[in-house]
Amino acid sequence: MKKKNGKFKFLYFLGLLLLPLELFAAEHTIEMLSSSDGQMMVFKPAVLKIDKGDTVKWISKNPGHNSAAIEEMIPKGFKAWNGKINEEISVKFTIEGIYGYKCTPHYILGMVGLIVVGNKTSNMENAKNFALEAEKKFATNKNRFTNYFSQIK
Ligand SMILES: [Cu+2]
């Protein structure tokens, strides 16, 4: 009986190996919020680490927000996404690296976020340099990018 069970487990494991990798890709959600935990105009979580192949969906918790890639802050070769206001856009991340994004109408208020895909941070320096210049122009939340980048090791 015990042996039979072991064989079954082996076949089950083998079956898992044969499934397409896609099935293991996770879907993450980020909320678009006007206020949360004393923070105004904020994505939650604002810093998200995911695996290559995972999908991120932005949820419209409060009206008036969107998610749009900051073109200077994404890896080369990845198509910049640009959600409409209130659109719950889904993006599949197929290239490793760091991704900066914004809420278009509230970019000036520092409504930004970071996604790290995999371990490779090939565009880290470029993205960070751009971000630290960009946040100087924010009217509020002037240290957001500095804070968010400090959370990435
Ligand atoms: Cu917004």
Image (cartoon, helix red, strand yellow):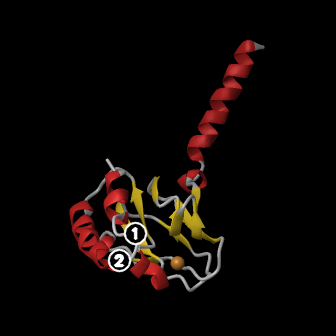
The residue pinned by badge 2 equals 138
Tell how many labels. Answer: 2
Identify the residue at horizontal 58%, vertical 75% (top origin): 89
- Inspect the image, locate mark 2, and give the three-letter code of the amino acid beneath it: Phe
The residue pinned by badge 1 equals 141
Residue 69 shows up from this direction: yes
Provide residue 28's location: percent of width, then percent of height.
57, 58
Task: Tell me whether circle 1 and circle 2 mark residues in contact (CB < 8 Å).
Answer: yes
Identify the residue at horizontal 47%, vertical 61% (top origin): 46
Task: Decide which of 85, 63 is in the foreground and name it.
Answer: 63
Check disc 2 and report its element: helix, strand or loop. Answer: loop
Provide residue 138's location: percent of width, then percent of height.
35, 77
95 left or right of 7 in image: left
12 left or right of 78 in image: right
Q: Among all residues in the image, which is located at the extreme right? A: 1
Provide residue 123's location: percent of width, then percent of height.
26, 64
83 left or right of 129 in image: right
Please determine whether, in this image, residue 40 is positioned above or below residue 5: below
Task: Decide which of 77, 68 is in the foreground and name it.
Answer: 68
Q: Quadrant of residue 109?
A: bottom left
Residue 36, label in figure = none
Residue 32 shows up from this direction: no
Provide residue 92's location: percent of width, then percent of height.
50, 67
Separation of marks 1 and 2 at Cα, in angstroms:
7 Å
Identify the residue at horizontal 67%, vertical 24% (top origin): 7
Please determine whether, in this image, residue 16 is positioned above or below residue 122: above
Q: Residues within 10 Å of mark 1 (few under 14, many from 20)?
A: some
- Inspect the image, locate mark 1, and give the three-letter code of the amino acid beneath it: Asn
